[in-house]
Image: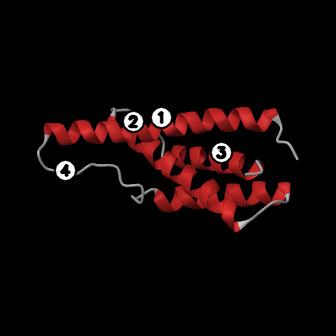
Amino acid sequence: MNPSPFLVVPAMLWTAVAALAVLAVLVLFVRSVRREPEPASDAWDPFGTGFPVIALAAVAAFTVAAAVRGHFSLGDTGLGILWPVMAATALVHAAGRRGRSWPRWSGAAFAAVGAALYGSLPL
């Protein structure tokens, strides 16, 4: 079964934003290490305080999307859940480092959208 372009294009755009968020966090970390000889105390931790909520949102969204499409498998679950969770924590951290404070639910929403898109696509 070929995936619909209405799913592929948003998934590609979401993946591009997620990759940029992870790269931004890495660049911010390298800059902070260069300024301070010791590692920064506010470095990105993907398993930080918002991780449980973000992970739960991604698990729920992926499970529902994959079950609706009828192709739930444990092999697809790793990529479909872990990548959106990591990208969401990176996005929230990068936004918080630049002085913009995002709502607490923004990371969970970003992860849920990514996981739902990946759950909808046959990987």
Which badge, 4 or 3, is on the more N-terminal residue?
Answer: 4
Mark linked to residue 39: 4
The answer to whether mark 1 and mark 3 are in CB contact below 8 A is: no
Q: Amino acid at mark 1?
A: Leu
Left or right: 39 as drawn, with respect to 82: left
Please tell me which residue lies in front, 26 or 94: 26
Residue at mark 3: 113
Q: Residues within 10 Å of mark 3 (few under 14, many from 20)?
A: many
Could you say which quadrant of the image residue 5 lies in? top right
Badge 4 marks a residue whose secondary structure is loop
Identify which residue is drawn at 11% across, 45% down. 37
Badge 3 marks a residue whose secondary structure is helix
Q: Is residue 62 visible?
A: yes
Q: CA distance from mark 1 to mark 3?
A: 16 Å
Residue at mark 1: 20
Which badge, 1 or 3, is on the more N-terminal residue?
Answer: 1
Left or right: 57 as drawn, with respect to 95: right
In the picture as drawn, the residue positioned furthest to the bottom comes out as: 74
Image location (x, y in percent) of residue 22:
44, 41
The answer to whether mark 1 and mark 2 are in CB contact below 8 A is: yes
Q: Amino acid at mark 2?
A: Ala
In the picture as drawn, the residue positioned furthest to the right comes out as: 1
